[in-house]
Image: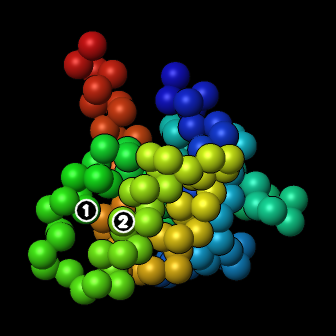
Protein backbone atom coordinates (compact mmCIF):
# COMPACT_ATOMS: atom_id res chain seq x y z
CA UNK A 1 0.00 0.00 0.00
CA UNK A 2 2.73 2.49 0.89
CA UNK A 3 4.47 1.95 -2.48
CA UNK A 4 1.43 3.40 -4.29
CA UNK A 5 1.10 6.27 -1.81
CA UNK A 6 4.66 7.40 -2.54
CA UNK A 7 4.12 7.79 -6.28
CA UNK A 8 3.95 11.51 -7.08
CA UNK A 9 5.68 12.62 -3.87
CA UNK A 10 8.13 15.48 -4.29
CA UNK A 11 11.54 14.81 -2.76
CA UNK A 12 14.82 16.63 -2.22
CA UNK A 13 17.98 14.58 -2.67
CA UNK A 14 19.81 14.89 0.62
CA UNK A 15 22.31 17.76 0.28
CA UNK A 16 24.91 15.93 2.38
CA UNK A 17 24.62 12.52 0.71
CA UNK A 18 27.96 10.74 1.07
CA UNK A 19 27.63 8.65 -2.11
CA UNK A 20 25.70 10.09 -5.06
CA UNK A 21 26.54 8.25 -8.28
CA UNK A 22 23.64 10.00 -10.05
CA UNK A 23 25.10 13.44 -9.25
CA UNK A 24 21.79 14.80 -7.95
CA UNK A 25 22.74 16.29 -4.58
CA UNK A 26 20.26 18.94 -3.43
CA UNK A 27 17.98 18.52 -6.47
CA UNK A 28 14.20 18.26 -6.37
CA UNK A 29 12.48 15.35 -8.06
CA UNK A 30 9.30 13.31 -7.97
CA UNK A 31 8.90 9.67 -7.03
CA UNK A 32 7.71 7.65 -10.02
CA UNK A 33 8.14 4.15 -8.58
CA UNK A 34 9.21 2.48 -5.37
CA UNK A 35 10.14 -0.98 -4.20
CA UNK A 36 10.28 -0.75 -0.44
CA UNK A 37 11.26 -4.38 -0.03
CA UNK A 38 14.56 -3.56 -1.74
CA UNK A 39 14.63 0.08 -0.51
CA UNK A 40 14.76 1.29 -4.11
CA UNK A 41 13.06 4.58 -4.96
CA UNK A 42 12.98 5.75 -8.59
CA UNK A 43 12.95 9.55 -8.92
CA UNK A 44 12.33 11.65 -12.02
CA UNK A 45 13.95 15.08 -12.34
CA UNK A 46 13.08 18.20 -14.33
CA UNK A 47 15.48 17.26 -17.11
CA UNK A 48 13.46 14.03 -17.65
CA UNK A 49 16.29 11.90 -16.29
CA UNK A 50 15.72 9.19 -13.69
CA UNK A 51 17.83 7.94 -10.80
CA UNK A 52 17.37 5.35 -8.05
CA UNK A 53 17.93 6.15 -4.40
CA UNK A 54 17.51 4.54 -1.03
CA UNK A 55 14.88 6.03 1.26
CA UNK A 56 17.46 7.59 3.59
CA UNK A 57 18.90 9.61 0.68
CA UNK A 58 15.66 11.50 0.05
CA UNK A 59 14.06 14.27 2.09
CA UNK A 60 10.34 15.05 2.14
CA UNK A 61 8.29 17.83 3.69
CA UNK A 62 6.96 17.35 7.18
CA UNK A 63 3.18 17.74 7.53
CA UNK A 64 2.17 21.42 7.50
CA UNK A 65 0.87 21.19 11.08
CA UNK A 66 4.22 19.91 12.30
CA UNK A 67 6.11 22.65 10.47
CA UNK A 68 3.80 25.22 12.07
CA UNK A 69 4.40 23.72 15.52
CA UNK A 70 8.18 23.68 14.94
CA UNK A 71 7.98 27.35 13.99
CA UNK A 72 6.11 28.16 17.20
CA UNK A 73 8.58 26.16 19.28
CA UNK A 74 11.68 27.81 17.81
CA UNK A 75 10.44 31.40 17.75
CA UNK A 76 12.73 32.65 20.53
CA UNK A 77 15.82 30.56 19.98
CA UNK A 78 16.84 31.09 16.37
CA UNK A 79 18.26 33.78 14.14
CA UNK A 80 15.93 36.19 12.36
CA UNK A 81 16.81 34.97 8.82
CA UNK A 82 16.04 31.36 9.78
CA UNK A 83 12.84 32.35 11.53
CA UNK A 84 11.81 34.39 8.49
CA UNK A 85 12.52 31.50 6.10
CA UNK A 86 10.51 28.99 8.13
CA UNK A 87 7.68 31.52 8.51
CA UNK A 88 7.60 31.93 4.71
CA UNK A 89 7.41 28.14 4.31
CA UNK A 90 4.62 27.90 6.88
CA UNK A 91 2.62 30.69 5.23
CA UNK A 92 3.16 29.37 1.73
CA UNK A 93 1.93 25.89 2.74
CA UNK A 94 -1.15 27.42 4.37
CA UNK A 95 -2.07 30.06 1.81
CA UNK A 96 -0.01 29.45 -1.32
CA UNK A 97 -1.43 28.34 -4.61
CA UNK A 98 -0.21 26.33 -7.54
CA UNK A 99 2.64 23.92 -6.96
CA UNK A 100 3.27 25.08 -3.41
CA UNK A 101 5.08 21.90 -2.34
CA UNK A 102 7.71 22.38 -5.04
CA UNK A 103 8.15 26.04 -4.08
CA UNK A 104 8.49 25.13 -0.40
CA UNK A 105 11.12 22.47 -1.19
CA UNK A 106 13.04 25.13 -3.11
CA UNK A 107 12.87 27.44 -0.10
CA UNK A 108 14.05 24.68 2.25
CA UNK A 109 16.85 23.75 -0.15
CA UNK A 110 18.17 27.32 0.01
CA UNK A 111 18.34 27.43 3.82
CA UNK A 112 20.03 24.41 5.38
CA UNK A 113 19.51 25.77 8.91
CA UNK A 114 15.75 25.30 8.73
CA UNK A 115 15.77 21.89 7.05
CA UNK A 116 15.51 19.96 10.35
CA UNK A 117 12.32 21.93 11.11
CA UNK A 118 10.55 21.27 7.81
CA UNK A 119 12.09 18.14 6.25
CA UNK A 120 12.52 14.51 7.24
CA UNK A 121 14.06 11.53 5.49
CA UNK A 122 11.73 9.41 3.43
CA UNK A 123 13.01 6.48 5.48
CA UNK A 124 11.56 7.98 8.69
CA UNK A 125 8.25 8.84 7.03
CA UNK A 126 7.89 5.30 5.69
CA UNK A 127 8.65 3.83 9.13
CA UNK A 128 5.97 6.02 10.71
CA UNK A 129 3.39 5.03 8.07
CA UNK A 130 4.21 1.36 8.47
CA UNK A 131 3.83 1.62 12.25
CA UNK A 132 0.48 3.38 11.83
CA UNK A 133 -0.71 0.68 9.43
CA UNK A 134 0.25 -2.05 11.91
CA UNK A 135 -1.75 -0.35 14.65
CA UNK A 136 -4.90 -0.58 12.54
At mark 2, the secondary structure is: helix
The answer to whether residue 127 is seen in the rendering is yes
Mark 2 crowdedness (10 Å alpha carbons): few <14, some 14-19, many ≥20? some
Q: Which residue is found at the position 68% from the left and 59% from the top?
A: 29
Q: Position of residue 49 (x, y in %)?
A: 84, 62
Instruction: Measuring from the top left, give residue 118's x and y in whole percent.
Output: 37, 61
Name the residue carrying label 1. 71
Residue 115, by quadrant, is: bottom left
Q: How is the image coloured?
A: rainbow
Q: CA distance from mark 2 to mark 1?
A: 7 Å
Compare marks 2 and 1 and give the one earlier in the sequence. Answer: 1
Q: Measuring from the top left, give residue 99's x and y in whole percent.
A: 66, 50
Along the viewing direction, whichever of 29 and 111 lies nearer the viewer: 111
In this view, the residue farthest toward the right is: 48
Residue at image mark 2:
87
Q: Nearer the viewer, residue 19 or 65?
A: 65
**Quadrant (top left, top right, bottom left, bottom right) of the C terminus:** top left
In the picture shown, does residue 65 fall above or below 75? Answer: above
Determine the secondary structure under disc 1: helix
| Dot 1 crowding, Cα within 10 Å, few <14, some 14–19, many 20+ | many
Could you say which quadrant of the image residue 77 lies in? bottom left
As drawn, the residue found furthest toward the top would be 136
Are the two marked residues, 2 and 1, in contact with CB atoms closer than 8 angstroms?
A: yes
Amino acid sequence: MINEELRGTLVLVHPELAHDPAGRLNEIGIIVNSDLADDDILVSFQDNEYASFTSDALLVLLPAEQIHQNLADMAYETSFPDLKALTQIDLFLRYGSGDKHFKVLEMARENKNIQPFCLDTLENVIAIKQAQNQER
